[in-house]
Image (tube, rainbow, N blue to C red):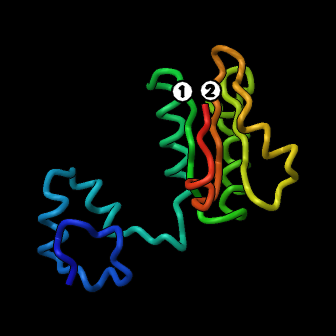
């Protein structure tokens, strides 16, 4: 079983006991615990990700948002969801940019450009990009 202090590296979630999990997340709300218990990295809830991005764009101060997803399929699906969103689909306030290695270099460079004042940049990328980029 895991030591109870770091579950991120666990390759087999079943190896973590219920008691260890309950202790580690004791400070979290019931909803958070339920979400974590049902987490399936192979089946991301893109509607939930969309809601989190919308919340950030409505409630938080200025700054870019970097969203890590599992691959191009999730990036593409979430990009479509953002276009239909009242909050994220407004190009005058939010610029949503995909980032994936299969994209042409000219499109990838766009994520490094500073958006106009008052426009938040949201980058949808694979977790591989985590070690490669810093956005502003």
Residue 3 appears at what percent x and percent y?
A: 17, 75
Residue at image position (52%, 60%) is 45
Q: Residue furthest top?
A: 117
Question: Are the two marked residues, 1 and 2, in contact with CB atoms closer than 8 angstroms?
Answer: yes
In the visual, does 23 lie left or right of 119? left
Residue at image position (74%, 30%) is 113
Mark 2 nearby-residue class (10 Å; few <14, some 14–19, many ≥20): many
Residue at image position (19%, 70%) is 21
Mark 1 nearby-residue class (10 Å; few <14, some 14–19, many ≥20): some
Residue at image position (56%, 48%) is 67
Total numbered badges shown on the rendered structure: 2
Q: Against 92, is 64 above or below?
A: below
Say which quadrant the C terminus sits in: top right
The numbered mark, 1 or 2, whose residue comes first in the sequence reads 1
Say which quadrant the N terminus sits in: bottom left
Q: Which residue is mark 2?
A: 120
Question: Can you tell which mark lies on residue 20?
Answer: none
Q: Secondary structure at mark 2?
A: strand
Q: Secondary structure at mark 1?
A: loop
Residue 101 appears at what percent x and percent y?
A: 76, 60
Residue 76 appears at what percent x and percent y?
A: 73, 56
In front: 39, or 129? 129
In the visual, does 50 lie left or right of 21? right
Question: Can you tell which mark lies on residue 63?
Answer: 1
Query: How far is disc 1 from disc 2 in space, using C-alphas?
Result: 6 Å
Quadrant housing residue 73: bottom right
In the visual, does 76 lie left or right of 87? right
In front: 51, or 134? 134
Residue 72 appears at what percent x and percent y?
A: 72, 62
């Amino acid at each position: 079983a895991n030591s109870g202090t770091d579950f991120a590296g666990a390759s087999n979630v079943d190896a973590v006991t219920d008691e260890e999990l309950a202790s580690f997340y004791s400070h979290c709300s019931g909803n958070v615990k339920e979400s974590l218990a049902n987490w399936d990295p192979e089946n991301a809830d893109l509607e939930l990700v969309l809601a989190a991005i919308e919340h950030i764009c409505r409630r938080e101060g200025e700054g870019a948002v970097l969203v890590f997803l599992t691959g191009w399929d999730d990036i593409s699906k979430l990009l479509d969801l953002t276009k239909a969103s009242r909050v994220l689909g407004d190009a005058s306030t939010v610029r949503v940019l995909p980032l994936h290695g299969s994209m042409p270099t000219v499109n990838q460079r766009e994520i490094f450009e500073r958006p106009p004042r008052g426009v938040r940049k949201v980058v949808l990328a694979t977790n591989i990009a985590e070690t490669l980029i810093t956005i502003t």
